[in-house]
Image (tube, rainbow, N blue to C red):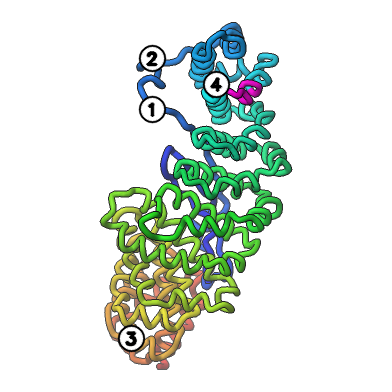
């Protein structure tokens, strides 16, 4: 069965998740496109939390770049101002100035500036503390690594405040920590012994949706670290996080799309690590994801919530990858997904993706591939629901999609004569003759595999192939090194059936 590891997706605030694709136990070799994607460097990005109110924007004025003297003045006022409003206003002005890379560089070079800001973060005045946290957040979002790394002395305080009572401060601390996690391995090395996993686990039962979404962001950045499989994910799996993560993914009126998207990606990264997917299965991951798939198929086309669209991709990947686990077969997990509604839901989502996000069609087809690979009952459902024709309609979309469609058809044909009888006659032969005209060797190769299975189990298919000039279609590939052996074998099979 195929295994998708990670592919690029973009959503919300130019927030990019991802890396390349990988597969295990492939029924066919990786295509060049998939191989290229597999080599892609993992992409992560930071998030910036800002108030969009006119007051926050400074009445439409662009904040000025600050020099050393101005930074020192604002810090001095924030420390020693006689009124709380004056102290808070000084930090607001500093934060606006820190939106500029030039000010950020000046700030971190100024002796004692970060120590002063961290001191203000520990203030017992809530508004002053929140403004200090916002200044740190601006610095953590910097594209200059040395600026973000200068914030590392504040990490122990940021973690401590996750156990506080202010949801605004907790949300801000989570996004700041997420940005620092992205920035450097040194930051992650510092955060792990400081107890970041336990601190994140303490937030997951928060009643505040904004906090949960921020938690999902910070956790997803941590789970994408290159050292995560050995140093991070085992601790996460040993915490209450997975169980609560699945609770937040349960479909129903309480499902929040923003929160669900973040935790679906978190679940995806954990599954891809293969540290202990059996544990996730025992927590009911397959059941939760299967129900979520049905829910998405029933709502994604009619809902105005764009977040539901963003949820489709990680849910498809999580299911695809969990189906490759031995624990699924041992624990009857496949049975949970043999419901005909699952197959129909996959096709509803395939039609939706074809219209709105055709680049994501391979996600749904890999799930269909993994569902049909070892499950005769799923193949029967696909045939009984007359879903072959809509599957064939996807062939022209792209070479990658064509290979996956043909692989699913091979999964069905491989089940034997009874299944091939349902595939033939019908629109399959004209479609296969069309794919033989493709120049892509993987598409043609998979077409040859499917024809070989059909000729083996359904002799009438070979006769029809000969009658419709099938041999002429094969001749154009006789000289192709990657295909000539299979072409010759198929010619012999067709002539002797």
User: Considering only vertical position in the picture, is 441 above or below 257?
Assistant: below
Asked if residue 119 is among those painted magenta in the image, a careful observer would answer yes
Locate residue 362 relative to residue 196 in the image: left or right.
left
Res. 52 mark: 1
The label nearer to you, 2 versus 3, is 2
Q: Nearer the viewer, mark 2 or mark 1?
A: 1
Asked if residue 165 shows in the view, the reply is yes
Marks 4/3: CA–CA distance: 71 Å
Quote the CA–CA distance across marks 2 and 3.
69 Å
Which residue position holds label 3? 422
Residue for point 37% across, 25% down: 53
Q: Give SS at disc 2.
A: loop
Q: Nearer the viewer, mark 1 or mark 3?
A: 1
Packing grade of label 3 (10 A; few <14, some 14-19, many >=20) is some
Mark 2 or mark 3, earlier in chain = 2
Check disc 2 and report the residue beneath it: 61
Q: How far apart, in angstroms, are the residues tagged by discs 1 and 4?
A: 20 Å
Residue 445 visible from this viewpoint: no
Horizontally, residue 255 falls left or right of residue 486, namely left
Closer to us: 483 or 11: 11
Residue at screen point 30% across, 86% down: 464
**Residue under numbered circle 4:** 128
Q: Earlier in the sequence, mark 1 or mark 3?
A: 1
């Amino acid at each position: 069965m195929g295994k998708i590891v990670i592919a690029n997706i973009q959503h919300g605030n130019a927030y990019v998740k991802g890396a390349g694709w990988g597969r295990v136990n492939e029924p066919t070799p990786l295509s060049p496109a998939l191989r290229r994607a597999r080599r892609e460097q993992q992409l992560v990005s930071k998030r910036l939390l800002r108030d969009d109110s006119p007051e926050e924007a400074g009445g439409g004025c662009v904040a000025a770049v600050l020099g050393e003297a101005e930074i020192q003045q604002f810090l001095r006022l924030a420390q020693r101002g006689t009124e709380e409003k004056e102290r808070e206003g000084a930090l607001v002005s500093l934060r606006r100035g820190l939106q500029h890379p030039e000010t950020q560089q000046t700030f971190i070079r100024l002796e004692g500036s970060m120590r002063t800001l961290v001191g203000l973060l520990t203030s017992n005045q809530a508004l002053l503390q929140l403004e200090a946290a916002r200044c740190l957040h601006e610095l953590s979002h910097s594209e200059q690594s040395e600026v973000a790394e200068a914030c590392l002395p504040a990490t122990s305080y940021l973690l401590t405040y996750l156990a506080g009572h202010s949801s605004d401060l907790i949300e801000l601390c989570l996004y700041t920590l997420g940005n620092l996690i992205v920035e450097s391995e040194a930051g992650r090395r510092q955060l792990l012994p400081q107890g970041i996993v336990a601190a994140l686990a303490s937030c997951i039962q928060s009643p505040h949706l904004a906090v949960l979404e921020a938690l999902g962001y910070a956790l997803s950045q941590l789970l994408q670290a290159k050292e995560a499989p050995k140093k991070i994910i085992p601790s996460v799996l040993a915490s209450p996080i997975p169980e609560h993560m699945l609770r937040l993914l349960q479909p129903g009126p309480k499902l929040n799309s923003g929160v669900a998207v973040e935790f679906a990606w978190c679940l995806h990264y954990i599954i891809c690590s293969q540290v202990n997917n059996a544990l996730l299965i025992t927590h009911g991951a397959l059941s939760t994801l299967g129900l979520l798939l049905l829910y998405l198929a029933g709502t994604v086309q009619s809902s105005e919530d764009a977040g539901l669209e963003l949820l489709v991709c990680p849910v498809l990947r999580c299911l695809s990858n969990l189906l490759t686990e031995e624990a699924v077969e041992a624990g009857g997990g496949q049975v949970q997904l043999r419901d005909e509604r699952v197959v129909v839901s996959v096709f509803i989502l395939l039609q939706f993706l074809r219209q709105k996000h055709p680049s994501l069609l391979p996600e749904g087809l890999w799930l269909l591939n993994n569902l049909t690979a070892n499950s005769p009952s799923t193949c029967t459902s696909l045939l009984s629901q007359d879903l072959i024709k809509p599957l064939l309609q996807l062939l022209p979309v792209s070479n990658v999609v064509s290979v996956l469609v043909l692989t699913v058809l091979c999964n069905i044909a491989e089940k034997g004569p009874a299944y091939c009888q349902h595939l033939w006659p019908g629109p399959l032969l004209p479609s296969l003759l069309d794919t033989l005209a493709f120049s892509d060797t993987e598409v043609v190769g998979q077409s040859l595999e499917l024809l070989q299975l059909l000729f083996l189990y359904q002799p009438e298919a070979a006769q029809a192939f000969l009658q419709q000039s099938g041999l002429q279609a094969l001749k154009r590939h006789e000289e192709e090194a990657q295909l000539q052996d299979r072409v010759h074998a198929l010619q012999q099979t067709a002539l002797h059936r």
